[in-house]
């Protein structure tokens, strides 16, 4: 067994979220127990949110892989308030739009290393490829075997914020065989002296859908970084409101209370619907 293979036989168990009980079309949330991956330091928590329609024979659904999983569904486990992803999925399910969300908890002290595709002399990092390989070759095959997914790249989204946004942007160009759309919320474009810009400039064209946003109150540098990335993507052939969605959220800061509503607005674009 290689260090990136999933050890043992993980089991999916129901994961109750009291604040979703009674909400019409709320997703069924399962927790993966017994997951162990040597390269990620051992155990890692994963939640999967399934639409109610998943119980109907013959239905298959696009999948959104998201980082910082403890911040997505549950205010009790989140860093600074959750994204409300369960409510977002229920909202679209009531409209007949369905998706599966796979929420991978971050590795706490390993977070910077796992989410950073490049090494920063001060902050560390550089383990992004290892983490992406776990998602692409370890977790995704397990999810596709277990649940009614649409496994093709055009139905597979990766999304996150801050360092998770940086990783999702990198994944779009690094693993276009797996991910056909990327949600890049408030990305940490400054990391490793902005190495991501050169990487994108030199990467082969991969197409796919890219959603990019930033809050105007995150800081002048962060706003300038996002605009620089937008312009670079336009130079690489992306087109606004065709395969690129760019949002500057007026008055928004850098935290979960802003990212959740923006994800809700972005989800139809990311899913191609």
Image (spheres, helix red, strand yellow):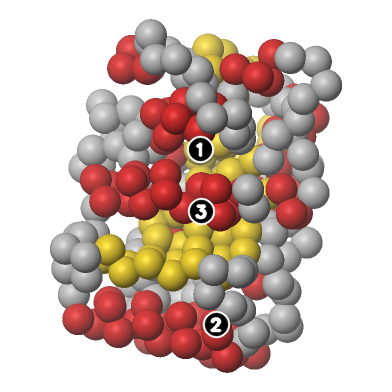
Q: Seen in the image, is 17 located left or right of residue 167?
A: left
Residue at image position (24%, 45%) is: 257
Kindly tell me whether residue 257 is visible in this rendering.
yes
Query: Which secondary structure lies at badge 3?
Result: strand
Q: Earlier in the sequence, mark 3 or mark 1?
A: 1
| Mark 3 neighbour class, 10 Å CA radius: few under 14, some 14 to 19, many 20 or more | many
Q: Would you name the residue on which mark 3 appears? A: 159
Q: Which labelled disc corresponds to residue 103?
A: 1
Residue at image position (28%, 47%) is: 256
Q: Quadrant of residue 199?
A: bottom right
Residue furthest toward the right?
58
Residue furthest toward the top?
22
Q: Seen in the image, is 169 located left or right of residue 69?
A: right
Q: CA distance from mark 3 to mark 1?
A: 10 Å
In this view, 62 is above or below 249 = above
Q: Which labelled disc corresponds to residue 233?
A: 2
Q: Residue 253 placed where, x, y %?
A: 19, 60
Q: Earlier in the sequence, mark 3 or mark 2?
A: 3
Q: CA distance from mark 2 to mark 1?
A: 27 Å
Q: Residue 272 placed where, x, y %?
A: 64, 52
In this view, 177 is above or below 204 = above
Q: Name the mark nearer the viewer: 3 or 2.
A: 2
């Amino acid at each position: 067994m290689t260090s990136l293979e999933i050890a043992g036989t993980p089991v999916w168990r129901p994961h109750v979220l009291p604040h979703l009980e009674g909400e019409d079309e709320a997703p069924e949330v399962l927790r993966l127990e017994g997951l162990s991956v040597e390269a990620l330091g051992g155990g890692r928590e994963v939640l999967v949110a399934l639409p109610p329609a998943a119980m109907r024979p013959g239905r298959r659904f696009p999948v959104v892989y998201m980082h910082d999983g403890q911040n997505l569904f549950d205010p009790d486990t989140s860093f600074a308030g959750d994204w409300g992803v369960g409510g977002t999925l229920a909202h679209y399910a009531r409209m007949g739009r369905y998706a599966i969300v796979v929420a991978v908890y971050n590795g706490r002290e390993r977070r910077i290393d796992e989410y950073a595709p490049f090494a920063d002399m001060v902050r560390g990092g550089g383990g992004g490829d290892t983490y992406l390989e776990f998602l692409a070759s370890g977790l995704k095959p397990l999810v596709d075997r277990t649940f009614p997914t649409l496994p093709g790249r055009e139905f597979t989204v990766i999304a996150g914020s801050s360092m998770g946004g940086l990783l999702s942007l990198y994944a779009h160009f690094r693993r276009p065989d797996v991910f056909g759309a990327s949600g890049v919320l408030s990305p940490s474009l400054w990391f490793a002296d902005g190495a991501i810009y050169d990487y994108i400039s030199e990467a082969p064209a991969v197409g796919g859908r890219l959603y990019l946003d930033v809050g105007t109150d995150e800081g002048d540098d962060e706003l300038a970084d996002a605009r620089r990335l937008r312009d670079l993507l336009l130079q690489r052939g992306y087109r606004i409101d065709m395969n690129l969605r760019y949002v500057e959220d007026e008055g928004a800061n850098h935290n979960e209370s802003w990212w959740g509503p923006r994800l809700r607005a972005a989800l139809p674009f990311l899913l191609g619907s």
